[in-house]
Image (cartoon, rainbow, N blue to C red):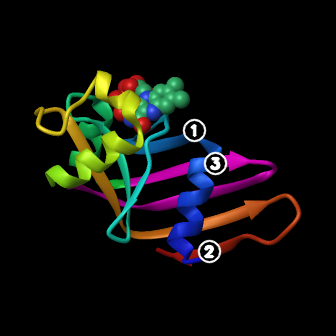
Amino acid sequence: MKDIERVYKFLNEARTYFLATVDKDQPRVRPFGTILLSDGKLYIQTGKIKDVSKQIAANPKAEICACKDGEWVRVCGELVNDDSYDVKVAMLEKMPNLKGMYSADDDNMQMLYFKNAKATFSSFTSAPETVDL
Ligand SMILES: Cc1cc2nc3c(=O)[nH]c(=O)nc-3n(C[C@H](O)[C@H](O)[C@H](O)COP(=O)(O)O)c2cc1C
């Protein structure tokens, strides 16, 4: 399994991760659950009207963290906006509950993928392992 596939599998199984952004000099964090692997890129989804989206536009550096069964993964990097229609459709098909709030051709739905990202897998029982994505 490729490293990015391992990260994707972990995030799917954990179901919820926490997304940290930078707001001037203040860290911000909130729960997220959307995740998609498409064209070798790890995507998350949000709404352009949200503060989280505005923070990423001003400073794309972000980190996510999820845990499952005594293990956790952190992914840090930059989040890049992707307005491609097809990737929005793929996200809506993977997580159909989103269709109640978003559609691929509204002005709000936002797909963001990680660029220059590293993932670190940690656990209480083994040394941390960092991979480039
Ligand atoms: C379990 C869970 C998963 C969530 N997943 C997402 C998500 O994938 N994308 C999103 O935009 N909001 C998601 N939310 C809602 C955000 O946490 C919420 O809108 C938050 O206020 C956004 O941050 P902001 O207020 O800094 O913009 C989720 C909330 C919960 C409880």
Magenta span includes 128:
no
Q: Which residues are magenta?
A: 62-81
Residue 55 located left or right of residue 104? right
Magenta span includes 70:
yes
N-terminal-most mark, 2 or 1: 1
Where residue 43 appears, as percent x and y from the top left, is: 36, 55
| Viewer-nearest residue: 133 or 61 | 133
Q: Are marks 2 and 1 in contact (CB under 8 Å)?
A: no
Location of the N terminus by quadrant is bottom right
Quadrant assignment for ligand 1: top left
Where residue 10 appears, as percent x and y from the top left, is: 62, 56
Mark 2 vs mark 1, foreground winner is 1
Task: Specify the label residue 13 is tagged with.
Answer: 3
Where residue 122 appears, as percent x and y from the top left, is: 73, 62
Name of the residue lying farthest toward the right = 125
**Amino acid on which the number 3 mark rests in the picture:** Glu
| Viewer-nearest residue: 123 or 10 | 10
Does residue 119 appear in the picture of this structure? no
Tell me the crowding category of disc 2: few under 14, some 14 to 19, or many 20 or more residues within 10 angstroms, Cα based: some
Residue 109 located left or right of residue 93? left
Badge 1 marks a residue whose secondary structure is: loop
Write the residue at 53% across / 68% down: 5
Write the residue at 40% across / 28% down: 97
**Mark 3 vs mark 1, CA separation in Å:** 9 Å
Badge 2 marks a residue whose secondary structure is: strand
Task: Specify the label residue 130 is tagged with.
Answer: 2
N-terminal-most mark, 2 or 3: 3
Task: Specify the label residue 16 is tagged with.
Answer: 1
